[in-house]
Every structure is written in C-alpha cells, then in structure tokens.
Amino acid sequence: MSRDQSLSGGRKYSNDEITVYWKPSACIHASYCYRELLEVFDPGRRPWVDMKGASTEKIIETVNMCPTEALTWKWNEEAKNQPVGSDQSNHIRFRRPELLAQDANAPEENPVTVKIMNDGPIVLKGDFSLAYSGINKDFREGIVSICRCGASEHQPFCDGHHRKIGFIG
Amino acid sequence: MEETKSGKSKTIIEVIDSGPLKITGNIVLKDFKRDKEIPMGEVLLCRCGKSSDKPFCDGSHKNK
C-alpha cells in the first residue's frame, strides 16, 4: 500500500466506478476543476466533491486536467488501473491507456507555458528561473501559480483569494 | 537572456515588487478569455488586477 501513503491528509470520493483523491496541500488553485465541472467540484459546497454530479467519463476528463497531484483518480476495479511513467511514481494519477499513449508521444516542452486562467492566476509551467523578494529559484518541469488579482496573502503566489473577492479579469 | 548548459536560452521570470510579472525568453502564452498576441521582447503581466489591458500590465498599479 506504499502508493497510498501520498494520500495522508487527503480525502477520497467514490462513485460505482472510480475514486477521486483530493490532496489539498498540492493544490495551486489553477481552478480547472470547478471551472470545467462545477456540478462535481464546487469549492463553495461541503463536501465540495459530489460524485453524482456528472458521468464518470466527464469526471475523469476533468481530474486529468489538474496540473498537480491535488486531484487524482483510480478505477475501483484494481485490475483496470495502469500507472503512468515512473517519473510520476509519487503521483497516484491513473490514466486510460489512450491517454498514456498521448503522453508518450507528446513533444518535450521547451518554451515555458504561461496560462492566464479565467478570473484566476497565471500558471507557469516548464523550465525557468523565478526571481521574487530577493530570492532566485530555478525550476525544472516546474509549475507555479502567480496571483493576478492582487488579493493573495501569499504574494507573489496564488492562494485562491480571487474567488473570495470575485475577481474578474 | 542567459544560456544554460544545454545551449538553450533560459526563460527568466521576475516578480517586480509592487509591479508586474516580467518574463524574458521563450514562452507560449495561453489566455483562456482573450485572444492575445505575445509582444516582442519582454512580457509584462498584470499582478494587481487593475490593468485595462489584461493580461498585460498597463501601469495601473501606480494609481492608488
């Protein structure tokens, strides 16, 4: 069960087919989950994940968008699970075989991807150096989310405050 | 622009105190709301939420 150790402190939510794992400490507030599928992922609701809100297919699709290991999923039927490459061995993300093939063929990311999330942060992904408050840090295949609304209490990083202030931008 | 050991140019991202995010180097910009061209040279992205030219900085952070 060593694979499940990364779940400590997290929660899990199941339907008949899959279990979604939620690891809040890994969340960078990229916010794909609730923008794509509010019926299932609603940060304003408790519990915030409702597995009855959409089809398994749709839930998988949305969880796979999560850029970190904050949201991952597994088939309940263990035999159907196929782990991704060893480079992500500490992740518990399982993907369908057709998605695995896509990953293998994907060209190596050279330029840094800069995503401007709707009403949310800037999400930086790739190899880059980041300088802030006198600190200079090198990232290899890194992922960082930078506040765009001005309200984060963990500047320069996003802490999810854009939702609380109703940031539009 | 710095050169890394592999000879590839390195992307430098700088958080300017009380100012924008400055990016120098090779990037792919994806704005989910707007269709924006990446300007030549350095890119300055708004961090204060007040710019009228989002996602770019327009200097609005200076107006209190």
Image (cartoon, coloured by chain):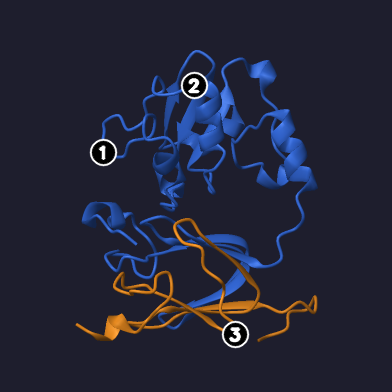
**Side of A24 relative to A60 (left or right):** left
Residue A10 visible (yes or no): yes
Q: Quadrant of the N terminus of chain A?
A: top right
- Classify residue B11 by image quadrant: bottom right
Residue A152 percent coordinates (x, y): 30, 64
Colour chosen for chain A = blue
Chain the render paints orange: B
Amino acid identity at mark 3 = Gly
Residue A12 percent coordinates (x, y): 43, 27
**Residue lying at the far front of the rendered structure:** B35
- Mark 1: which secondary structure? loop
Residue A81 percent coordinates (x, y): 67, 24
The tag earlier along the polypeptide, 1 or 2, is: 1
**Residue nearest the viewer, comparing A36 with A48:** A36
Label for residue B41?
3
Q: How many marks?
A: 3
- Mark 3: which secondary structure? loop
Name the residue tied to disc 1.
A44
- Mark 2: which secondary structure? loop
Residue A5 visible (yes or no): no
